[in-house]
Amino acid sequence: MPIRRRSHHERPTRPTAPFVALLTLMRALAMASPASAAVPPEDGTITVEARAADESQPLSPDIFRDAATSALAARGFILLDGADHAAYRMELVVRASEVGTTSLRVDQSSPALISGGVAKAVGSILKVPIPTNKSRTVALERTQLDMVLRKRGADDVVWRGTAVTVRPARTQGDVATALCAALVRAYPAQSDSVIGVP
C-alpha cells in the first residue's frame, strides 16, 4: 500500500482541545511552585488582633493579644497598633471548653495572727501559716489558640500554628503566656501538628 506523503502546501494539524488543556494545567502548576510561596518574615512591623471563637465564652481576648505581643516583641518584631500601618497582621482565635474537674491540695491555711511573737517587743505580731490537709475541686479547661499570619491587605496565609493546653479554669493569664510562647518558639517552622503545652 503506497504511503501518502504530506504536501508542502498542507497545513499542520492543530492541537486538540484536551492537549491544550493539559498544557494550560502544566503551566499553572509550574507557576504555583513552592518557590513562589510567601516566606514567613523573621522581623519587621506586625499588628496583633485577637478574638474568641465563641463570643458567649467567658474569655478575655485582650489577655492573649498582650501575651502574643510580648512574645513577638522578644522575637524581634516591631509591634504597631492598627492593621493599616504594619506590614503583617497576626490573628489570634481562642477556644475554650470545660473538660472535667480536678482536686487541688491546699498546702496551708491563711496565716494566723498571734500577738507577741518577739520577747520584750511591745505590740509585735507574728504571722504563722497553719498547715492543713484540705483540698478543693476546680474545673479543668481545655484552651486552644490558633495563630494565623497574613500580609497587610492580603488573604493568603503566610504562616499558621495551633497550640492547646488543659489547666484549671480562671488562669487565663498563665494559659495565654504559655500558649503564645510555645507558638512563637516554633515559628517560622510550618506544621499541621498541634503543639501540646503542659
Image (cartoon, rainbow, N blue to C red):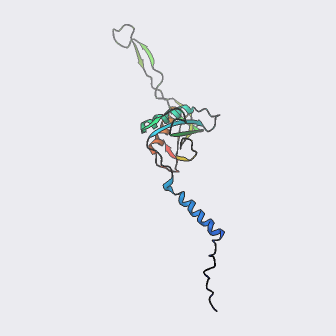
Extreme-left residue of the structure: 120
Frontmost residue, 36 versus 134: 36
The residue shown at (60%, 36%) is 52
Vertical arrangement, residue 111 with respect to residue 170, above or below: above
Q: Nearer the viewer, residue 93 or 115?
A: 93
- Image position, residue 178 (x, y; %): 48, 38
Residue 175 screen position, x and y as percent? 51, 36
Q: Residue at x 42, y 39 (%)?
A: 75
Of 58 and 142, the residue lying toward us:
58
- The residue shown at (63%, 79%) is 10
Q: Is residue 99 visible?
A: no
Residue 119 relative to residue 5: left or right: left
Give the number of marks.
0
- 64 over 158 or under it: above or below: above
Can you name the residue that lies furthest to the top here?
122
Q: Residue at x 45, y 39 (%)?
A: 44
From the viewer's perspective, is 74 left or right of 159?
left
- Image position of 70 (left or right of 54): left
In the image, residue 47 lies at what x, y percent? 51, 36
Residue 53 place in picture, x, y as percent: 61, 39
The one of 58 and 40 positioned closer to us in this rendering: 40
